[in-house]
Structure formats: structure tokens, C-alpha cells
Amino acid sequence: MPIKLTAFEHKIAKQLAALKRKSGSHSPSPAMLRDVSGITVKHDFCFLSNPYATDLFLKYWKRDFGNKNTRNLHKLVEQYPSQNRVLAGKLEKIVGVPAQHIFVGNGATEIIQAMLQNFAKRKILVPVPTFSPYLEFAPKGVKTVIHQLRKEAGFKLEAKRFLKDIQREKPDSVVIINPSNPDGGYVSASTLRQLLEKLRHIGIVIIDESFIHFADKNKRTPQDAARLVNTFPNLVVIKSLSKDFGIAGLRLGYGVMSKQRISTLLARGYLWNISGFGEYFLNLLNNRGFMKEYEKARLLAIRERDDFFTQLSTLKGLKVYPSRANMFLIELLGGSRAEDFMVTLLARYGIYVRLCKDKIGLNGEFIRIASCKAKENLKLVRALKNILSE
Ligand SMILES: *Cc1c(COP(=O)(O)O)cnc(C)c1O
């Protein structure tokens, strides 16, 4: 049965819709929701991150800057951070390529922006549904065209169809997100390599691996694609550190690309684009103790994500798409509107989920949920069960 909102919930729905209009293609933050009277966000399933990695970061932070170390903090705040090329050196080890191939960004979003605005020439082809900045940051005079991923194929990238669209559209820039957002769809390393072979004539091929740490529990250094920049000079690998390391607030990401592209970017700015706080985190990536503990946090997040999927799959009235990222795209069957579902979860359970109405290329009733800690995931499963059985 479709959900029926109470009069009170209708009122909330109206206020939420107004907030959404102010937020563009992103969801209103929990801070913005504080202005909606009568609701409290207790569990945020909208925001994507590994909560165990955030806990780990804070443990090191307290150790290095806590009460006894305010002098360290004073220095961090007072002094200039290192420049981009020095910071790139701090990523060499975990990325597995020399620093001359690495550009450090104030969040991956800054790199997406830099790529599209500096290197896209005529036309960008982007598979949809997708992370919206890829559709929004093309400069004037550069066209953005979409490649529709099919619902019947579970929004998987179908290599043949994709190549056919590229042949027809003749873009000079192409984007692949792997695993994808909002559905966590995954392209295998071998398929990716075959695609790169066939796309040698394209000016720039962006592979966004922002969720790659969630993709494979057996691969400790999952950044395979980055190592291909020597073989494919047109390849740019973009990676956010926000989600898998749980540090969206620090603003850190990197891009792996040809030396020439990096020189071009640095000649146009980005001198001190990373803060001292970001630099502190890059130092942690070279700390063996930290990385060992991070590996545990990574495996735990993957395990709980897979358990979450098993639990969600037992619920009737919705379809969960398999995911190799830390999120699930859920389609509502049985006639409920996604908006009503979102409002009900928020009003009755304090659970905030991502409404996908604004996602281009996603037609139907969809919500996206993050995989949080197991205990919270269970709360969402129970709430869904209650709502669906009404
Ligand atoms: C979140 C996200 C980013 C941007 O992350 P930053 O916080 O800017 O580092 C880039 N790509 C994808 C696919 C994302 O989901």
C-alpha cells in the first residue's frame, strides 16, 4: 500500500521542498534541517562516509593536538602549509605513482572543476545517473551530453552501448565513475583496461575512483587505474578522500594524470590550495600504524555494508541494487512516492535519506541510503519494515 502522510507530515514535506530548492542538485544538510520544526535528524543516511575511519582520524588528532599538544596546533594554524608538489610527494606511497603525476585538490570537487575547465574542449560525455558536478561544471562553449545507464541492466555500465554512444557523439572528454554514485555499480579492472584501449583517441578519460576502497576486501591498495597513467596519457584518475577516510570536512582529494597536465594546472594557480589540516592528514597516510588501523576500518565498513544488503534484500515492496560502494540505491515498488517515504522516515524515526528526484537519468521512485555503522543500519531496516508492512 502507498504511504499516507498525516497533516503534520504534509507540513514538513512542504518545508523540506522549500529547503531543497535552495540547495541545488545537492541535499539540504542536517544543519539546514534544524530550521524545520517538529523533526530531529538522529540518523543521517544521506551523507556518505566510513564512520570508523572518522573515529580513527580523531584518535590520532587527539593524540597529536590534544590538551598536552596545543603548541602543535598553534603551529599548524599559524604557519603556511606546503605547496602542491610537496604534498603530492606524500601521496606517492599509497597511490603507487611518482609525485610528478599527482595533483592534490581541495576535495575531489576542485579537481573535477579543474579538469573540465582546463582540458575539456568541445564535448563531455557523462553516464547518468551520476555525481552531479560532472554535469554542471563544463565551461561556456563546451557541451555536456549524457549516456543513459539502463535500469534493466541495474545501471551497470554496458561497455558496448557506451562505446557506441561515444562513437556517435564524438566527445573529447569522457567520464567513468567506478564504483558509481548513486548506485555503487562496478566496472572490473579488465573491462576498464579494454575500454581505455578503445578510448585512446579521446582527449581526456576521467575515471573517478572515489569509492574504490569499498570495492574489494581482498585488495589492500585498490588504486589499479592510477598505475595506468603511463600507458594511457589521456587518462585522469580522480579520487576523493572524503568518503572512504571519513574526512569530508578536511577537503582532500587527488588526481593522477600526465606530468604535462599537472604543470599546466600549477602554472594557473593552486599554490596553497590545501590547508595545514589537510597536510596533517596526508602525513597520516604515511604512518604505518595509522594505515594498519585504517585497513581494519575499511574491512569492517565493507562487511557491514554486505550485511546491510542481505537485510535490505529480505524486505518486500522495494528493490535494492547491488553495490560495491558504501551506499545503496533503493527503488520503491508498490506505488509509494519517494518523497513521502523520505518524509515519513524523517518525521517518525528521525532518519534522513537522500531523495533522488533531482538525479538526471533516474526515472521512478528512488532513494539513496548510506551504509552507516551496523547498529544504525539495523534501525533503518526496522523502520523500513514497519513502514512497508502498514
Ligand atoms: C563525493 C564525490 C566526489 C567529491 O568529493 P570531495 O568531497 O569533493 O572530495 C567526487 N566524486 C564522486 C563520485 C563523489 O561521490
Image (tube, rainbow, N blue to C red):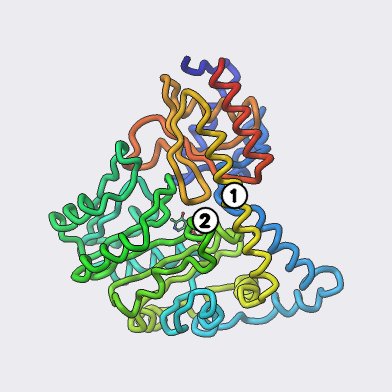
Label 2: few (<14), some (14–19) or many (≥20) C-alpha neighbours in 10 Å:
many
Q: Is residue 242 above or below residue 24?
A: below
Residue 163 vs residue 128, the one in the foreground: 163
Where residue 72 sits in the image (x, y, percent)? 77, 78
**The C terminus appears in which quarter of the rendering?**
top right
Q: Name the residue located 46 percent from the left edge and 28 percent from the top edge.
A: 318
- Quick check: is the Cβ at mark 1 less than 8 Å away from ligand 1? no
Q: Is residue 69 left or right of residue 382?
A: right
- Residue at the farthest right position: 68
Residue 119: image quadrant is bottom left
Callout 1 amino acid: Arg
Q: Name the residue located 64 percent from the left edge and 58 percent from the top edge.
A: 297
Residue 284: image quadrant is bottom right
Separation of residues labelled 1 and 2 (CA atoms)? 10 Å
Q: Name the residue located 73 percent from the left edge and 80 percent from the top edge.
A: 75
Residue receiving disc 1 = 303
Callout 2 amino acid: Phe
Where residue 349 sits in the image (x, y, percent)? 65, 29
Q: Is residue 235 above or below residue 388?
A: below
Where residue 96 sits in the image (x, y, percent)? 48, 78
Residue receiving disc 2 = 214
Q: Name the residue located 54 percent from the left edge and 21 percent from the top edge.
A: 388
